Image: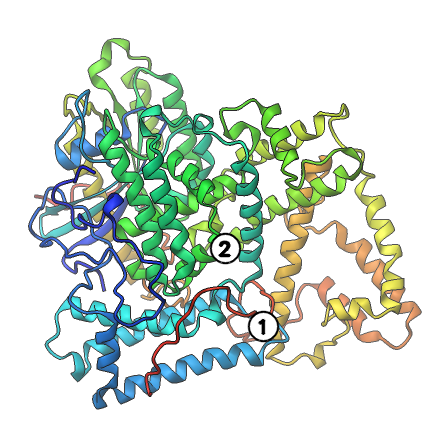
C-alpha cells in the first residue's frame, strides 16, 4: 500500500493495519487498542494535518490506569467509580418492571466521565501530568466503566434491536444479488483483497466492549477503503467514491448488532472525544446503515423489477404477494416510518444514526411510495383495498369490551385505570415513557397506514381525530364496568389536556424493555479496582 | 477538553451534486493541489485546516459528502451539527445549481441553529460553457444571505478567499452567539449535561451581519 506522507496516524493504515486482534480479549490489560499511533507534533504543519484519531494515548495504556487506581491516593476516586457502577446496576434491577432509558443512561455516564476527568486534572495523582497522560486516564476510565456496565448498557434498547433486525434482514437480502455496479463503483476500486480486509476489520466490532475499541474497528475498516482509494484514484478521490464502497463492504461484512454498536458508541463514548476523523468515519457508517435500511428500487442502478423480485425472493417483509400483502406492507412501512418519529424524539442530543430519515421526508416518502407502489403494482391493483380507517377503528373498538373483560387492557396499559390521586411522582417517568411509546407506535402506524392506503390518520396540527372514538369506546366499557370510575378520570384528564402535577422531574425519553443478558461477547473479567 | 486547546474547532460540510468538484476544492484549499490527471496520493473526504485570524485560531474540519442522487436523503446525517455548509455547483450544469437550492431549503428546515452558508460557483475555468449566469446565482445567494464565490479548483481561483470568508463568518457568528447568550442570562437552553452533544443555540443575529469585525 502506498503510504500517505505526513498524516498523524500513518502506519496503522491499510492492509498492514494492526487492527484489534480478535484473539485479544476485551479488557485484557496489556492490550492497547489499535490506532493509537504516535501523533505528529500538533504545530508541525499548519497547512495540512490530518487529525489523528483522538489524542494519543501511546504513552500510557489501560494497565497504567489500573495501576494508578491501586495507589492509596486513588481511594477517593475508586470509591466514586465503584459507587457509580453499582448505582447504575442497581437502577437497572430495581426498575426492571418498567423500561430503562438508554438516553438517560448515556447522559449519566457522559456526565460522570467528564466530571471524573475534571477531577483527575486537579488530583495529586496526576500532578504535573501531560495533556496526553490525562487523556489516557480518561480513556482508561471510560474503558473500565463501560466494560463493567456492558451487559447493562449494550444492545438492550428496543429501538436498537429493531434496527439491528431490520438492517440484518436487508443486508442478508442484498448479499444475494448486489454487485458493485449497482452502486456504480468504478472498476478500478474493485479490489477483492482490500474489501476483504475492510470487512474483517469491521467484523471485529463485537469482540470489543469499550466504545473506543469498537470505534477503532469502524475506523480501521474505513481506513482500508481510504487507502485503497488513494492508491487507485486517478483523480482526488473523495466521498463520492468512498461511500458506495463502504456500503458495499458493509453489506458483505454484515456484522451482527451493528446498530446497537453505533448507538452504544454515540451514547457512551465521551462526546468530546468523538471528534475529528473518528466522527467523520463514524458518521459515514451511520449513513451507510441508514442507506441500507431505507433502500428502495430507485436507490440502486438496477432494474426496479429485478430489485423487487430479488427482495421478494429473500423474503424481505413487505415484498410478499397479495393475500397477506396489506398486512405485511403495513408492518414493513411502519417499520421504516417508525424511524422518523424516533428520530424526532431524540433529535436534540441523539446520535446521528437515528436522525436519518426525518428531514428529507418528502424524498424518502416518495421512495417508500415508489417501493410500495412498485411492489404492489406487480399484481394489478396499485393500492391494496384496505377498508376505510373509520371502519377499521370501529371494529377495533368493538373488541375493546372483550379485552377489557379479560383484563388485557390493564395488562398492556398499566395506568389506564389509575386515577390522578393514585399517581405518585415517581410514576411520572414510567408514565411518560409509556406515553412516548404509544405516541411512537401511533405515529408508525399512521404513517404506515398512509403509505399503504393513502389515507391520512395522523394528527393534524394539534387535533387528534382518532381520540374521540376511542374515548367513546372507553366510556362504553366504563359504563358496563360499574365502579371502575378511575379510568374515566384518566380519560377526562387526557381530554382536558394535562393533569400533571407541577414540578415534574426531567423526563426520561424512549422506553426500552427490561435489561437482557449481555450479548455474545468474549468478555474477560476486568480486574476489580478494589481487588 | 478540546484536543488542542488553542484552536476552536468548526465543522464545515461540503455539499454538492456528484462530480461538481467538491473534493478538488477541498484538496486545493488544504494542500494546494489540483489533481487533474495525475495520481493524487491522498483521498480527501476528511481534512482539517488550521488558520489564525487576528487573535483567533481556528481549526476547520472539512467534511466531504457523497453527492450522488441516491445519497441525497442521507444529507441530514452529515450537516445536522455542522457550523458551516459549503454548497458547490458546477457552472456548466444547471441541475447542480438547482440541487444547491434544494439543499438551502433543507438546511433552513432541518438545522435549527444559524449556520454559515456559502455557495461556490465552481469550474470557472470552463466559463465558456457556463449555464448559470453569474447574476442569477449571485442574486440567489444574496436572497438567502449566503456568501457567493466564483471558484476554480483547477486554476486555484477564489478557493483560499472563500474558506477565509467562511472562517471569518464562523468567528463573527460565535461572538454574536456569545453576546446573545450573555444578554439572555447565561446558561444554555436546557440543563443538559455534556459538552460535546451540542445543545443548539439559536442566535438572533443573522449570519451575515458582521463579517469584517475580525481583521487580520
Foreground mark, 1 or 2?
2
Q: Which secondary structure lies at badge 2?
A: loop
Q: What's the chain of the residue with tag 2?
A: A
Q: Is residue B111 visible?
A: no
Q: Locate the N terminus of chain A by quadrant.
A: top left
Residue A351, image x, y percentages: 43, 55
Q: Which residue does the numbered mark 1 point to in the structure image?
A: A429
Residue at screen point 34% across, 84% down: A80
- Please state which of residues A263 and A185 is positioned toward the viewer in this rendering: A185
Disc 1 crowd rating (10 Å Cα; few below 14, some 14-19, many 20+) is many
Q: Residue at x 22, y 30 (%)?
A: B25
A229 relative position to B113: left or right: left
Front-lying residue, A418 or A57:
A57
Quadrant holding the C terminus of chain A:
bottom left
Q: How is the image coloured?
A: rainbow
- Along the viewing direction, whichever of A486 and A319 lies nearer the viewer: A319
Residue A281 lies, in percent from the top left, at 33, 47
Using the rendered image of the protein, determine whether residue B129 is visible from the camera's viewpoint: yes
Residue A424 position by quadrant: bottom right
| Among numbered discs 1 and 2, the one appearing first in the sequence | 2
Judge by depth and name the residue closer to the eye, A206 or A380.
A206
Tell me residue B18's x, y (percent).
36, 26
Q: Are marks 1 and 2 on the same chain?
A: yes
- Crowding around mark 2 (Cα neighbors within 10 Å: few <14, some 14 to 19, many 20+) is many
Q: Position of residue B200 (x, y in %)?
A: 38, 55
Question: What residue is disc 2 on?
Answer: A257
Left or right: A433 as drawn, with respect to B137: right
Side of B186 relative to B101 (left or right): left
Relative height, residue B151 to residue B131 (above, below) = below
Secondary structure, mark 1, is helix
The residue depicted at 22 percent of the width and 33 percent of the height is: A231
Corner quadrant of residue A119: bottom left
Amino acid at each position: 500500500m502506498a503510504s500517505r506522507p505526513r498524516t498523524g496516524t500513518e502506519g496503522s493504515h491499510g492492509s498492514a493495519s494492526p487492527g484489534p486482534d480478535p484473539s485479544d480479549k476485551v479488557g485484557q490489560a496489556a492490550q492497547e487498542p489499535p490506532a493509537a499511533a504516535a501523533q505528529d507534533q500538533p504545530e508541525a504543519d499548519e497547512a495540512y494535518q490530518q487529525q489523528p484519531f483522538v489524542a494519543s494515548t501511546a504513552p500510557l495504556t489501560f494497565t497504567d490506569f489500573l495501576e494508578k487506581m491501586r495507589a492509596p491516593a486513588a481511594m477517593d476516586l475508586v470509591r466514586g467509580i465503584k459507587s457509580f457502577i453499582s448505582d447504575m446496576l442497581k437502577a437497572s434491577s430495581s426498575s426492571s418492571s418498567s423500561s430503562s432509558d438508554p438516553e438517560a443512561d448515556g447522559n449519566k455516564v457522559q456526565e460522570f466521565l467528564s466530571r471524573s476527568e475534571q477531577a483527575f486534572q486537579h488530583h495529586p495523582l496526576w500532578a504535573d501530568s501531560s495533556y496526553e497522560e490525562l487523556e489516557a486516564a480518561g480513556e482508561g476510565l471510560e474503558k473500565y466503566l463501560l466494560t463493567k456496565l456492558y451487559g447493562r448498557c449494550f444492545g438492550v434498547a428496543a429501538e436498537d434491536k429493531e434496527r439491528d433486525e431490520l438492517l440484518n434482514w436487508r443486508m442478508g437480502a442484498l448479499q444475494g444479488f448486489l454487485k458493485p455496479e449497482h452502486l456504480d463503483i468504478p472498476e478500478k476500486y474493485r479490489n477483492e483483497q482490500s474489501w476483504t480486509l475492510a470487512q474483517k476489520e469491521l467484523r471485529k466490532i463485537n469482540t470489543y466492549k469499550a466504545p473506543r475499541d469498537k470505534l477503532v474497528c469502524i475506523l480501521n475498516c474505513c481506513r482500508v477503503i481510504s487507502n485503497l482509494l488513494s492508491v487507485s484514484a486517478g483523480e482526488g478521490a473523495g466521498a463520492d467514491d468512498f461511500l458506495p464502497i463502504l456500503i458495499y463492504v458493509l453489506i458483505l461484512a454484515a456484522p451482527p448488532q451493528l446498530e446497537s454498536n453505533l448507538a452504544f458508541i454515540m451514547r457512551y463514548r465521551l462526546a468530546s472525544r468523538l471528534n475529528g476523523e473518528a466522527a467523520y468515519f463514524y458518521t459515514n457508517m451511520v449513513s451507510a446503515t441508514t442507506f441500507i435500511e431505507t433502500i428502495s428500487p430507485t436507490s440502486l442502478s438496477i432494474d426496479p423489477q429485478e430489485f423487487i423480485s430479488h427482495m421478494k425472493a429473500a423474503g424481505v417483509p413487505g415484498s410478499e404477494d397479495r393475500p397477506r400483502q396489506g398486512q405485511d406492507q403495513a408492518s414493513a412501512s411502519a417499520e421504516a416510518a417508525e424511524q422518523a418519529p424516533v428520530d424526532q424524539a431524540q433529535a436534540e442530543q441523539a446520535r446521528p444514526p437515528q436522525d436519518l430519515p426525518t428531514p428529507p421526508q418528502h424524498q424518502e416518502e416518495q421512495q417508500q411510495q415508489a417501493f410500495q407502489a412498485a411492489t404492489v403494482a406487480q399484481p394489478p391493483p396499485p393500492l391494496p383495498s384496505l377498508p376505510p380507517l373509520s371502519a377499521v377503528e370501529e371494529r377495533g373498538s368493538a373488541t375493546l369490551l372483550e379485552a377489557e373483560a379479560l383484563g388485557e387492557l390493564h395488562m398492556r396499559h398499566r395506568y389506564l385505570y389509575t386515577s390522578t390521586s393514585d399517581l405518585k411522582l415517581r410514576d411520572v417517568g414510567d408514565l411518560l415513557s409509556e406515553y412516548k411509546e404509544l405516541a411512537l407506535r401511533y405515529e408508525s402506524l399512521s404513517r404506515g397506514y398512509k403509505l399503504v392506503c393513502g389515507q391520512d390518520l395522523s394528527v393534524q396540527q394539534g387535533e387528534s381525530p382518532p381520540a374521540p372514538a376511542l374515548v367513546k369506546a372507553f366510556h362504553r366499557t366504563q359504563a358496563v364496568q360499574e365502579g371502575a370510575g378511575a379510568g374515566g378520570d384518566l380519560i377526562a384528564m387526557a381530554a382536558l389536556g394535562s393533569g400533571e402535577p407541577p414540578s415534574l422531574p426531567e423526563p426520561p425519553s424512549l422506553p426500552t424493555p427490561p435489561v437482557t443478558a449481555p450479548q455474545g461477547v468474549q468478555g474477560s473479567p476486568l480486574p476489580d479496582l478494589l481487588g | 477538553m478540546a484536543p488542542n486547546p488553542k484552536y476552536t474547532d468548526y465543522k464545515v460540510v461540503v455539499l454538492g451534486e456528484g462530480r461538481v468538484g467538491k473534493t478538488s476544492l477541498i484538496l486545493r484549499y488544504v494542500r494546494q493541489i489540483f489533481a487533474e490527471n495525475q495520481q493524487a496520493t491522498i483521498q480527501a473526504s476528511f481534512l482539517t485546516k488550521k488558520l489564525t485570524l487576528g487573535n483567533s485560531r481556528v481549526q476547520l474540519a472539512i467534511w466531504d459528502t457523497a453527492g450522488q442522487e441516491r445519497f441525497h436523503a442521507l444529507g441530514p446525517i452529515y450537516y445536522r451539527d455542522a457550523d458551516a455548509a459549503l454548497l458547490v455547483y458546477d457552472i456548466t450544469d444547471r441541475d447542480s445549481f438547482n440541487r444547491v437550492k434544494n439543499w438551502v431549503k433543507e438546511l433552513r428546515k432541518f438545522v435549527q441553529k444559524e449556520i454559515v452558508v456559502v455557495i461556490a460557483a465552481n469550474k470557472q475555468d470552463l466559463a465558456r460553457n457556463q449555464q448559470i449566469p453569474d447574476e442569477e446565482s449571485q442574486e440567489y445567494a444574496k436572497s438567502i444571505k449566503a456568501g457567493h464565490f466564483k471558484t476554480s479548483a483547477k486554476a486555484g481561483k477564489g478557493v483560499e478567499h472563500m474558506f477565509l470568508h467562511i472562517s471569518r463568518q464562523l468567528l463573527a457568528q460565535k461572538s454574536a452567539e456569545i453576546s446573545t447568550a450573555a444578554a439572555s442570562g447565561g446558561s444554555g437552553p436546557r440543563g443538559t449535561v455534556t459538552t460535546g452533544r451540542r445543545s443548539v443555540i439559536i442566535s438572533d443575529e443573522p449570519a451575515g451581519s458582521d463579517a469584517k469585525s475580525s481583521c487580520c
